[in-house]
Image (tube, rainbow, N blue to C red):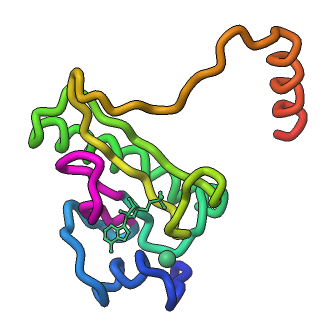
Amino acid sequence: MPPVSESCIFCRIAKGELPSIKIYEDDDILAFLDINPVSSGHTLVIPKGHYETLLDIPDALGAKMTPALARIGRAIMTATKADGFNCLQNNFAASGQIVFHSHWHVIPRFDGDGLKQWPHKTNVDAAALQAVAEAIRAAL
Ligand code: AMP
Ligand code: ZN
């Protein structure tokens, strides 16, 4: 049996204890509309089991997420006539994660919709890029 948290809002949605507007469901995965959408059709895709962040999701379950996300993303583009979509996942509070049951946001996007993502740093020192790359490789 996958892990469950009695106090987790998404576990309670997965169990049917709290309402949601369902988009897709299989044995392992549930997709439902975000209650405060960025754009119409904004969908959350969750593993039914309680895994707090991406780091906690077992590999076999993770392998099932990508095809589900692609299927849902394709359906969202068809249904909303979106020109694209963002597939976003927040991990830990510093990233903006509010619900600590891992989830992917699938957000329909339209040409010229004006939604901005993060500011990028430009003119970053080449040595700094090499140093951070080395640190990440060493941590793998
Ligand atoms: P995050 O910041 O990645 O943790 O995002 C959590 C998302 O969950 C937000 O976009 C909320 O609008 C959404 N959310 C919270 N409670 C519910 C709920 N009961 N049903 C649907 N979406 C929810
Ligand atoms: Zn949960």
Which segment did they paint magenta?
Answer: 29-44
Asked if residue 84 lies left or right of residue 55, the reply is: left
Q: Residue 9: give x, y in percent of width and height.
A: 42, 80
Q: Give the quarter of the image for residue 78.
A: top left
Number of on-image labels? 0
Residue at figure coordinates x 65%, y 20% from the top left: 121
**In what quadrant of the picture does the C terminus appear?**
top right
1 relative to 108, above or below:
below
In front: 28, or 103? 103
Residue at figure coordinates x 45%, y 59% from the top left: 103
Q: Give the quarter of the image for residue 18.
A: bottom left
Residue at figure coordinates x 57%, y 69% from the top left: 51
Q: Does the magenta run of residues contain 32? A: yes
Asked if residue 126 lies left or right of residue 110, the reply is: right
50 relative to 128, above or below:
below
Q: Residue 47: give x, y in percent of width and height.
A: 44, 65
Asked if residue 105 lies left or right of residue 74, the reply is: right
In front: 53, or 117? 117
Asked if residue 94 lies left or right of residue 69, the reply is: right
Residue at figure coordinates x 23%, y 46% from the top left: 39
Q: Residue 117: give x, y in percent of width and height.
A: 45, 32
Q: Does the magenta run of residues contain 63? A: no
Q: Residue 20: give x, y in percent of width and height.
A: 23, 74
Q: Give the quarter of the image for residue 28.
A: bottom left
